[in-house]
Amino acid sequence: MKKNKSLIKTLNWVLAGLLAILGFSNCEPRVEYGTPNASYTVKGKVVNKEDLKPIKGIRIGYGLYPGPVLMYGVIPAPYTQLAADSSNITGDYKLTQKFYAGDIPENETPVYVQDVDGNENGLFRDTVINVNFDNATRSGKRTDWYEGELSIELDIELTPKKEGNE
């Protein structure tokens, strides 16, 4: 009986020592669950196409629209409005949104540009610009599923609305 107890104690010490040396985990790669994602940034300046003066109060926004392209100068509805920004007094804007894999097919997404301030700075035509991120500048630290930030510079020239040319 005494020999049995000492044998069990010795085996426990040996197993504890092996576990301490080899660790408690196995050598399999870790499995992660999630979806690859990245922050997409578009920044630039909004100007009047005729005189190249900056325009304040123009709304610039990402949107996901799974249907046909712009018709007759009207932004199609319904579309899902995502992040949005308004141009400041110098016409500058910066738009950032995190997208997941599959949100941006072929690395291209529509950016909606809307004159939302009324007649304050004149009236401008709303438009949709398809922004391609193939040549975007990549920055930020990549971690696990996060791919960093993709940035693109985009200056927007808006056409003023004229009477009879809505």
Image (cartoon, rainbow, N blue to C red):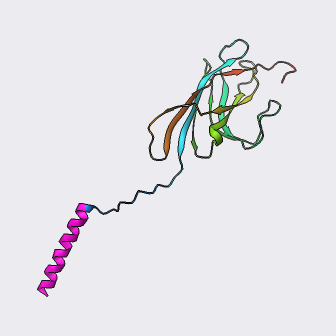
Relative to 5, residue 80 above or below: above
Percent across and percent down for residue 166 are 83, 24
**Residue 113 position by quadrant:** top right
**Residue 130 position by quadrant:** top right
Q: Nearer the viewer, residue 123 or 111?
A: 111
Q: Main secondary structure of the magenta part?
A: helix
Residue 13: in magenta span:
yes
Count every numbered label the image shows and give the total. Answer: 0
Percent across and percent down for residue 10 are 16, 75
Relative to 75, residue 18 above or below: below
In the visual, does 142 lie left or right of 13?
A: right
Relative to 113, residue 146 above or below: below
Percent across and percent down for residue 153 are 58, 25
Residue 120: in magenta span:
no
Q: Residue at x 19, y 70 (%)?
A: 14
> Which residue is the extreme one toward the bottom?
1
Q: Residue at x 71, y 11 (%)?
A: 51
Q: Residues in magenta?
A: 1-21
Q: Is residue 94 visible?
A: no
Relative to 134, residue 165 above or below: above
Q: Residue at x 16, y 84 (%)?
A: 4
In the visual, does 122 lie left or right of 9?
A: right
Q: Nearer the viewer, residue 137 or 27?
A: 27
**Residue 79 position by quadrant:** top right
Q: Residue at x 18, y 79 (%)?
A: 8
